Amino acid sequence: MEPMKPMKPMEPMKPMEPMKPMRSEAWWPEALGQPASSGGQDGLRYAVFPDRKRLLIERAGRVEAYDTGGRRISGVQQASGGEPVFSGEDGPVRLGELRKAD
């Protein structure tokens, strides 16, 4: 039987590459800039642009724009009856309360 040979020294580890940020593609028009709030649930995505007074909703590949007027929308609540309800400064905001924008 042959005697055991010494182990080779470990090679230095290569530095890890930094993780790439997790970003989703912007689905809203570039002219609107960055939304103050965006997210999605149950096949619906939304983006709020308070400076432009716009709320964009994307469902099934179709984007609809709504005029938020003076309402400050901060997020979406659980949808009831299929329509999303958004969180506003003065309470819930339903899509039916907003005027569609061009």
Image (tube, grey):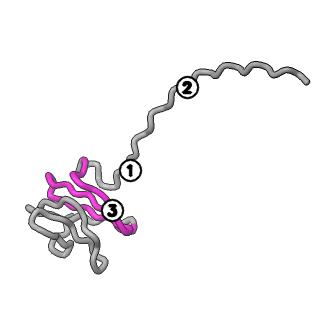
Q: Quadrant of the N terminus?
A: top right
Snapshot quadrant of residue 91 = bottom left
Taking 13 as reference, is 41 left or right?
A: left
**In contact (CB < 8 Å): disc 3 and disc 2:** no
8 shown above or below 58:
above
- Mark 3 or mark 1: whose residue is earlier in sequence: 1
Q: Label 2: how many residues lie within 10 Å, few (<14), some (14-19) or many (20+)?
A: few
| Range of residues picked out in magenta | 34-60
Q: Which residue is mark 3?
A: 40
In what element is the residue under mark 3? strand
Mark carried by residue 25:
1
On the image, the x and y values in percent for residue 2 come to 88, 22
Q: Given the image, on which type of amino acid does mark 3 rest?
A: Gly
Give the spatial CA distance, label 3 vs label 1: 13 Å
Residue occupying image coordinates x 38% and y 50%:
25
In what element is the residue under mark 2? loop
Q: Quadrant of the C terminus?
A: bottom left
Q: Given the image, on which type of amino acid does mark 1 rest?
A: Glu
Q: Which residue is mark 2?
A: 14
